[in-house]
Amino acid sequence: MGPIPRAALAATLLFTLQAAPPQSLEQQFSQLRKSPPELYAFLLRMPKGGDLHNHLAGAIYAERFIDAAAASGLCVEKPDWKMIPTCTGPNDVDAKFADHDDHIYNEIINAYSMRNYVPGRQSPHDHFFDSFGLFSLADKGHTGEFVADLARRAADQNESYIELMALSGGSAVAKLEAAAGFDGNFESSADKLRAAGFEGVVSGLKNTVEQVEKDRRAALHCEQDGSSAPCQVLIRYVYQVLRESPKEQVFAQTMAGFALAASDPRVVAINFVQPEDGINSMRDYHLHMQMVEFCKRLYPKVHITLHAGELVSGLVPPDGLRFHIREALDIGHAERIGHGVDIMYETGAVDLLKQMHAKRTAVEIALTSNDVILGVRGIDHPFPIYRKYGVPVVIVTDDEGVNRSHLTQEYQRAVLTYGLTYADVKQIVRNSLEYSFLSGASYWADASYQTPVKACAAGGAKTKLCEAFLAASDKATAEADLERRFREFEAATIKK
């Protein structure tokens, strides 16, 4: 038999290509794990739902802080490059000149972030947390603009929702607690706070939220074009309690945060921030959880997410690793846990994991943050353990500016490190909205995300019954929108 004529061979090849079934997304994804750059491009376009653990101060890149400092007429002082109001010393540098000198510019970026960090006398943990005190002045007057920056970044990555830690009591609450004090009795201390002008302070915090939102929308020009992708990113706020403060301040902050979240729907939860291994954080941890429990009784509808277990062996004594997550759940009524790195050092760790699975307590996983701050990565990280026990996980950024990361890279890291499938990733993305603190009922009738609620199961989201259901629920609306984004993404991505 002679060779097949070229025309016949071409026709056979064309028929084969036309008849070949489309390559599934799972097959594509398996191939992409072998090529990190291509995987990144895929994940960048993929819908990512929400980022539920994002500190505004830590989310801003150092370059943006330099711009803001220049606009505000600030200076930076050597050798640590801390921002100061005015130049007074011979080594101070006007911020507006910083971006004209590569050496100064790069030194500031390195001081304000983990970029080019070199281990030495200062640990990565200390370098990270110390950086916040260096650039804190840049935030004054620019908060709304910074929130707008995050919205743009989120829109570029096909995110639709952010829960942003951007609010704290500040000087107003400090004055309040100074007048009221804390005598160890929650009831009497709360009464003293109310008598000292508590309602006025909470009203002032609501005005702050209003101003931040006004400035955010102005920076994004949402009044001119509210349909733009950054304007469509839904943002809710989480009130931050600074737990390294004296106990009387922590109590006043906690009360104020609960009252604010109970009265302003844009503030969806409270959280405790600052290093968990700090002096006050460790010494007063149990007391702090009791404060949260007391305020939860006063404001039962307020949501709670708590940094707990952001610790490793050696950072604190062994007994300091044994109870933080459990107390956050059992006393602090946490609905989500931030980090949870030391879970297997907790007393009764397996029972605790089973409890979290049964109660659907989600864990906010910040892989880059846990690596650069705590040195926990790969098989040493409990991410696969949480998944093994069926604990819901969400992937978050934590402090993407200081850590020089963003949400797409966090997903890329999770996929490459733990061999996640596309189905795994899609479930985690869906978790980010299901375990969010958005108001209203879920779009889903089951925990596996297979069946929508009855109102939307027949006929889809366009029926009048489903439209009415979605109109009554921010969460369901966001989840239905995520499904639309997935359909569009997958239709455009599946290779024929």
Image (cartoon, rainbow, N blue to C red):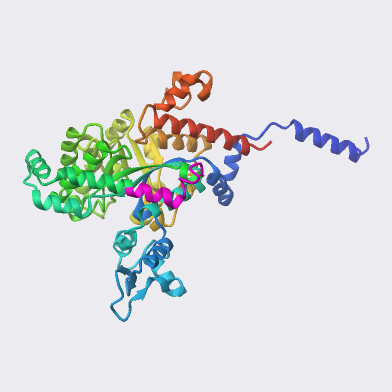
Q: Which residues are magenta?
A: 211-228
Q: Quadrant of the C terminus?
A: top right
Q: Position of residue 363 (x, y in %)?
A: 35, 39
Q: Is residue 358 visible?
A: yes
Q: Quadrant of the N terminus?
A: top right
Residue 451 forms part of the magenta stretch: no
User: Residue 308 or 162: which is nearer the viewer?
Assistant: 162
Q: Position of residue 121 (x, y in %)?
A: 30, 68
Residue 223 forms part of the magenta stretch: yes
110 above or below 88?
A: above
Most extreme residue toward the right is 2
| Residue 372, image quadrant | bottom left
User: Residue 34 or 298: which is nearer the viewer?
Assistant: 298
In this rendering, would 316 be left or right of 161? left
Q: How many marks?
A: 0
Q: Position of residue 379 (x, y in %)?
A: 41, 47
375 above or below 239?
A: below
Q: Position of residue 346 (x, y in %)?
A: 25, 41
Residue at the (40%, 45%) spot, across then down = 396
In this rendering, would 223 be left or right of 127? right
Most extreme residue toward the front is 224
Residue at the (27%, 34%) spot, across then down = 352
Residue at the (80%, 32%) spot, across then down = 15
| Residue 490, image quadrant | top right
| Residue 106, image quadrant | bottom left
Residue at the (26%, 50%) spot, across then down = 168
Q: Is residue 339 visible?
A: no
